[in-house]
Image: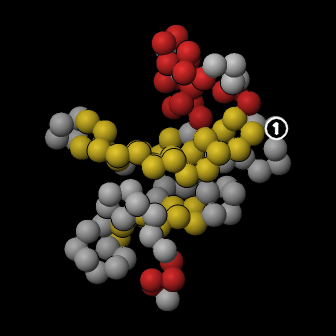
């Protein structure tokens, strides 16, 4: 699993073919955070879940400063991912990258 920020997305758009997808959008004005999970055996991306998106000029940017916690939170035998962002949001994802509703746990 890897936490990614806007630098990851900027590298993707360094490719001129990918940059065409954006039209006239200036990606330098935005900050993005996401969770990317890799299969280390195949070296392939299993899934990506975007979390927050913000402008770079705002007071609060979409950074992820800390490592996620990985635990079987719901007892189904699969590891869930818990991560907070600098927006003050807290995400719980299942082992497929789907957002789980916190009310399930309370």
Question: Can the viewer see residue 102 in this picture?
Answer: yes
> Can you give x and y, in whole percent of width and height, for residue 13 in the image?
54, 21
Residue 60, x across and y down, in percent? 77, 50
Q: Is residue 18 above or below residue 59?
A: above
Residue at the image position 82 percent from the left and 38 percent from the top: 57
> Residue at image x 55%, y 52%?
51
Residue that label 1 marks: 57
Vertical order, 89 against 7 (above or below): below
Picture layout, residue 45 above or below residue 25: below
Residue 47 horizontal/vertical position (percent): 35, 46
Q: Residue furthest top?
A: 16
Which residue does the image show at 51% across and 31% down from the upper left?
8
Query: Would you place residue 25 above or below residue 68 in this image?
Result: above
Give the colour scheme shown.
secondary structure
Please tell me how many numbered marks the rendered image carries.
Answer: 1
* Residue 14 makes an appearance in the image: no
Identity of the residue drawn at 57% across and 62% down: 84
Q: Position of residue 7 (x, y in %)?
A: 57, 30
Is 27 on the left-hand or right-hand side of 34?
Answer: right
Front-lying residue, 17 or 68: 17
The local crowd at label 1, few if under 14, some if 14 to 19, many if 20 or more residues have their Cα within 10 Å, is: few
Q: Quadrant of residue 28?
A: top right
> Of all residues shown, which one is farthest toward the bottom?
106
Left or right: 79 in relation to 32: left
Q: Secondary structure at mark 1?
A: loop
């Amino acid at each position: 699993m890897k936490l990614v920020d806007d630098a990851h997305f900027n590298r993707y758009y360094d490719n001129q073919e990918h940059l065409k997808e954006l039209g006239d959008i200036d990606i330098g004005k935005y900050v993005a955070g996401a969770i990317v999970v890799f299969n280390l055996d195949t070296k392939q991306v299993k899934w990506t879940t975007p979390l927050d998106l913000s402008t770079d000029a705002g007071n609060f940017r979409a950074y992820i400063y800390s490592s996620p916690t990985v635990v079987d939170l719901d007892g189904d035998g699969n590891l869930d991912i818990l991560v907070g962002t600098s927006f003050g949001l807290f995400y719980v994802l299942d082992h497929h990258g789907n957002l789980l509703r916190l009310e399930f746990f309370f």
